[in-house]
Amino acid sequence: QHMLGHHPYTNVLDGAEEIEKEKGVDSLIEEKDQESDPDVFSSFPLMRLHPFHTPSWYHRYQHIYAPFLFALMTLAKVFQQDYEVAISKRLYHIDAKVRYGSTWNVMRFWGMKFITTIYMLGLPIYFHGVVNGMALFVIGHLACGELLATMFIVNHVIEGVSYAKKDLKGAVGDDDDDKKRNKEKVVAKPVTMLGDTPMDQTRAQAIENSTKDADQKPIPMIPFNDWAAVQCQTSVNWAPGSWFWNHFSGGLSHQIEHHLFPSICHTNYAYIQDVVENTCAEYGVPYQSEPSLVVAYGKMINHLKYLGRAKSE
């Protein structure tokens, strides 16, 4: 989910697929376009995290109940998602046969599930009793889920962040389903919840700065849907340059650098942060950063509240 869905297609939603899902149609895995971000659609309809989704009445309160759902993140993974992937051999829209198509890998999964259940749940119950053992297990997962989900969501669902949507290119005038699916899909220009594109402003500012220096070469026009530009438009840093928060969050506080350079060790993010920020300014690419996790969390809650409103409001 993280490496095959979220990272390459951050905040990108397959508009055509979502329309089919709202009609109650779940396409075969072979027919799905796997280029979309499960982090923004897997929580729907419990939570509305993408402007394209149709809001329901209860989404008005998602900014209130969201923190409680965050705590269930790892419990849901351990008791629901892991089993669903192993049995169905798919993770939402992602084909998981490359791993679970192997009998050996399936055997490893069930073996490790048994072992981890023994040492994470069985041993605490054995040494501390049923009530205390289960309480330790649940409290540990709730704390872990709350912390992880909080540090994940503030990076991509927050005031000022952009969203992208893939649509069929051109009008579809043929009723043949196969021809519809084979239509080329393109990523539209990323926009915020309000419908504006921050890169319009940053690009204009970069052009203005370049004209002030007669010796400076004109900056190249970076496409709005360029992969690296999309990563910057859909990601937000918090506590930038802080080695403590970078270490504590495992690099999540430098989310832009994490998405641009996922293969380098996160301990380097704090040292390249200013280089990335200056380069973005030079080429007119947005670079959003919040001073602290507290500020980012507050803006995330406000953003959830705004997303919970009807499209007409």
Image (cartoon, grey):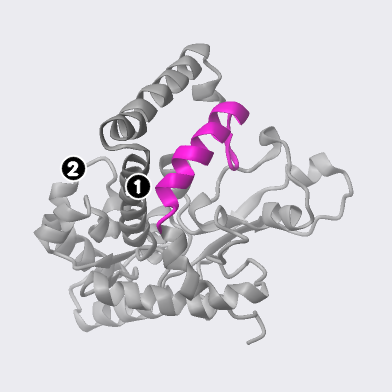
Per the image, the residue denoted by label 2 is: 265
Between marks 1 and 2, how big is the CA–CA gap? 35 Å
Mark number displayed over residue 135: 1
- Asked whether 85 or 80 is in front, the reply is 80
Q: Give amino acid for label 1.
A: Ala
Where residue 294 sits, quadrant-wise, is: bottom left
* Residue 253 position (above or below residue 133): below
- Asked whether 245 or 121 is in front, the reply is 121
Where residue 187 sits, quadrant-wise, is: bottom right
Relative to 15, 158 lies left or right: left
Q: State the residue at coordinates (35%, 28%).
A: 116
Magenta part of the chain? 71-94
- Asked whether 221 or 68 is in front, the reply is 68
Q: Give amino acid for label 2.
A: Cys
The picture places residue 109, in percent across and down from the top left corner, at 45, 22
Q: State the residue at coordinates (16%, 60%).
A: 245
The picture places residue 110, in percent across and down from the top left corner, at 47, 21
> Quarter of the image containing the C terminus?
bottom right
